[in-house]
Image: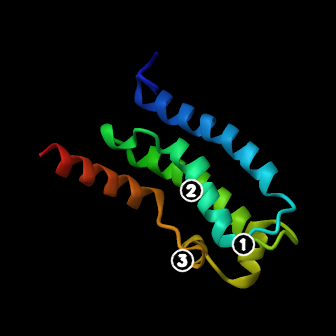
Amino acid sequence: MRMLWSWVGVEADARMKIKRANGLWAKVKGGLKGTRVSKRWKVRIVETCVENGLMFDCQVRVWWKKDVKSMLKWIDKCYRYVWSDKNGQPLRQMQARGENMQDVRNRLGVKSVQWKIEKMVLERIGHVM
């Protein structure tokens, strides 16, 4: 059941957040293709348009590790696309260069979804108290 922009039920909420972010990513990815915008700005666009949609109201409920992991896995796919040089599949490029996802995030200057959720929760706790 949907209530105040969130789905009641832990599994349904995480699935629907990813589904909603998937639609946003399709629009953003189409807009980023063929542009001459720097990777830094592409990352900011993805953070603003896609990641914020994925993490909307994430600080107000408890998250299971598997849900955070699935969200992290999904958003990492977007960052791999931004990081790649578009000459093949991003995962194969990472393998050829000997880099892992943490290296990609460091190059792009992005924190993980888990870190961002924890930060938002702590900010909310501090604000309420």
Q: Nearer the viewer, residue 86 or 102?
A: 86
Give the residue at mark 3.
Answer: 106
Give the residue at mark 2.
Answer: 47
Residue 62 lies, with reference to residue 45, above or below; the image says: above
Q: How is the image coloured?
A: rainbow
Spatial CA span between label 3 and label 1: 16 Å
Q: Residues within 10 Å of mark 3 (few under 14, many from 20)?
A: few
Spatial CA span between label 2 and label 1: 14 Å
The amino acid type of the residue labelled 2 equals Glu
Horizontal side of residue 107 vs 33, given as left or right: left
> In the structure shown, which secondary structural element does the residue marked by tag 1 occupy?
loop
The residue drawn where x is 60% and y is 48% is 50
Residue 7 lies, with reference to residue 80, above or below; the image says: above
Give the residue at mark 1.
Answer: 38
Q: Earlier in the sequence, mark 3 or mark 2?
A: 2
Q: Earlier in the sequence, mark 3 or mark 1?
A: 1
> In the structure shown, which secondary structural element does the residue marked by tag 2 occupy?
helix
The amino acid type of the residue labelled 1 equals Ser
Q: Nearer the viewer, residue 58 or 129?
A: 129
Q: Nearer the viewer, residue 32 or 84?
A: 32
> In the structure shown, which secondary structural element does the residue marked by tag 3 occupy?
helix
